[in-house]
Each structure stands twice: as structure tokens, then as C-alpha cells.
Image (cartoon, rainbow, N blue to C red):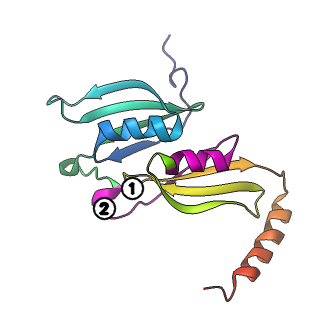
Amino acid sequence: MVKAIPEGYHTATPMLAVRGGVQAIDFYKKALGAHERFRLPSPDGKSIMHAELQVGDSIIMLADEQPDMGCKSPTSLGGTTGSLFLYVQDADAAFKRAVDAGAKAVMAPADMFWGDRFGQVEDPFGHRWGFATHKEDLTPEEIGKRQKQFMASMAGKT
């Protein structure tokens, strides 16, 4: 009997389009400690048709962009429409590792009103990665109160 969701996968699995799939795989290994599970080169052998990486307990798929099929990378689009959020043991160390590997710092790690320490980078392929370490268990009401305080403190700082 074949499982509807293969062993090791979760219901939702991110699929990234990149320009430079081979380089992206190497970068994610260095920056995120990714383990390469599978690589399927394109028929011409020059690009990645499909690859799977494991980061922690999650699988991330990636492929080189295929603009003629409507699959463009953030590099081609001039920005990204989403980001990946990773819970890690040490957000500061994960952030530093990614920056040291060539990612651009977007937001240095800081303690956030929702109870996480969080920082964000942009990788050389245009994808944004958030690194979070959960520090406090808060109720939705506590988060809402802290959000109001945070927004009030930000007023006038623009």
C-alpha cells in the first residue's frame, strides 16, 4: 500500500524557483545546513529540473526557473511574494551562518512581541528566510497587547 503523503514529507512542502539551481543547492547546504536528498538534472544537464533538500525535519523542493512555463524566480520578478520561516535552536547563530554564507541581512535578530527571537535574510537567489527561536508562550491576548505597545513605540519613527 502506497502512502498518500510519502514518508518524511509534511502536508505542505515549499517549492522554490531559482536562477542557478546548482549554486542554490550549494548555498543552502552552507547557509542552512541542508542535506541534499535528491537531484534530477534537466535533459541538457545544465540546470536542475527538480531537487529536494532537507532542512531540519522539513523538505524543501527547488528547481531552476522555467519562464516559458510561467515559473519565474524572485531574481526575474524583481522581488519575492513570500518568505520561509524556520524555527531553529539559535536564531542568532542561524542568521550569522546565512550571512557568512552570502545572504543579505534584512532584519537583525531581535526579541519580538509575539514571543520569538527573530531575524531575516535574503539569499543570493532572492528568497527571504526568517529564523526564529521561541522564547515565550503567550496567549493571543498577550500578543495583541504587546503588538499595540510595539506599534505605539514605532509611531513617529518613520
Q: CA distance from mark 1 to mark 2?
A: 9 Å
Instruction: State the residue at coordinates (83%, 52%).
Output: 136
Q: Position of residue 20 (x, y in %)?
A: 28, 43
Side (left or right) of 92 relative to 3: right
Q: Which residue is mark 1?
A: 126
Q: Position of residue 27 (x, y in %)?
A: 41, 40
Q: Which label number is shown at residue 77?
A: 2
Q: Nearer the viewer, residue 116 or 68?
A: 116
Horizontal relation, residue 46 to residue 38: left or right:
left
Tell me what residue is drawn at x 45 percent, y 31 percent: 53
Using the image, determine if residue 126 lies above or below residue 1.
below
Percent x, y for residue 95? 59, 50
Q: Residue at x 16, y 28 (%)?
A: 43
- At label 1, the amino acid type is Gly
- Looking at the image, residue 4 sits to the left or right of residue 88; the answer is left
Mark 2 residue type: Leu
Report whether 84 appears left or right of 74: right
Q: Residue furthest front?
A: 100
The magenta-colored residue range is 74-99
